[in-house]
Image (spheres, helix red, strand yellow):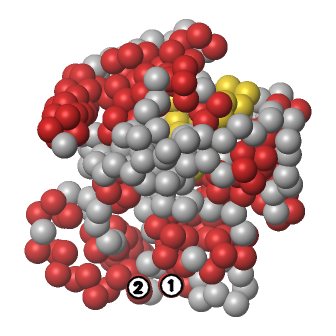
Amino acid sequence: MKKKQFARLICFLILVCFLGKSLSYIVRTNGVIKDRFAGFYAEPKDSIEVMMYGASPVGASFAPGLLWKMGGVTSYPLSTNSQSPVAIKYLIEETYKYQHPGLIIIEPRMFCSDPEKIREDKAHIREVTDNLRYSLTRKRMIDAMLSDDDNKVEYYVDIIKYHSNIGMLLDPDEWKKYDYSVSDPDKGFQYQKEINAQAEFGDTDDKEVMPIPKECEDVLLDLLEYLKDQDADVLFVATPRFYEYEYECRMNYIRDIVEKSGYSFLNMNRHLEEMGFDLKHDFNDGVHVNLLGSYKCSTYLAQYINTHYDFSTDLHTDTGSWDAAYDRYMEEYNGFLDQVEDY
């Protein structure tokens, strides 16, 4: 084969790979999670001061626009529904390709879950693996989250799963995600607009503990060891949820492990009165807060961050999108507040 022919072949293969990758990004299932991750990739390099990881309560509890207004920090959640604790280390690794946050926040509730049920929940595994750009980090995440019995090829090359979404090629908004990079005006926040009341809250002693599953504890210890090599402060934040005695005991158990490793732990269920949290109106359901609750969670977290952390590097070169995110949040919040008051 002549050099010119070889060069043309290489160019052709590169073009095929590029088009295949872009096509795969476009036909991935759309929705809040896809918008959130594409929005993360669209943020200017090294512009995020606080990164947040964990299950869906992260994206519903902390509004980056409000954290910006109240605390003066830029933040972004890489959360997914029922996010496996195994994924967090790889999400942080992916983050460091684009951002170098001064503070990492981790929501720990999934460390209480049955690891076998997490592995069997393929839909939620895909929700995190299918929303990363193609990379070796993504491959390692897939290998860590799946067993050898699973068909990993369909996760490595997810267009195999989503080829039936070919109709999405007719949607101009999805074409914008050809490189998985489109700004999210809400900065990853998810609006929750239901109300479910918690009549009362139990009183679990801080010293009462209950072990989490051994496999989840091993994942937590591995994550804590990994975090030692990262140049960032780390804060574990348990977001508000309906009271369960066993859950609170497990949070105490996780807290002890985290603090023993030298990191901070904040259980918001222990500060509901201080937050001004209304058990009758601020929950969306048993495990998520609604817009009213998110306002109180975000405000409290902003105050906590300002009290305990100091971001010496000014990354605020483009404040317009953050001001806009705050305005969008307040418009939704005030509209929901009016509905609640009418009700």
Q: Which residue position is annotated with label 2?
A: 161
Quadrant of res 254: top right
Q: Is residue 300 visible?
A: yes
Residue 235: mark in rendering: none
Quadrant of res 42: top left
Q: Which residue position is annotated with label 1?
A: 154
Please give the name of the residue rendered at 63% of the width and 13% of the height, measured from the top-left corner. Answer: 308
Q: Position of residue 219 (x, y in %)?
A: 78, 57
| CB under 8 Å between discs 1 and 2 | yes
Farthest-out residue, front: 199
Q: Is residue 76 above or below residue 197?
A: above
Q: Is residue 22 visible?
A: no
Quadrant of res 212: bottom right
Q: Is residue 308 above or below residue 143?
A: above
Placement of the N terminus among the 4 image quadrants: bottom left
Which amino acid lies under the numbered mark 2 shown in the image of this protein? Lys
Q: Alpha-carbon neighbours of circle 2 within 10 Å: few (<14), some, or many (≥20)?
A: some
Viewer-proximal residue among 315 and 110 = 110
Please give the name of the residue rendered at 85% of the width and 52% of the height, measured from the top-left corner. Answer: 210
Q: Position of residue 322 (x, y in %)?
A: 28, 26
Of mark 1 and mark 2, the one earlier in the sequence is 1
Left or right of residue 54, residue 298 in this image: left
Left or right of residue 2, residue 342 in this image: left
Q: Position of residue 332 (x, y in %)?
A: 20, 37
Q: CA distance from mark 1 to mark 2?
A: 6 Å
Which amino acid lies under the numbered mark 1 shown in the image of this protein? Glu
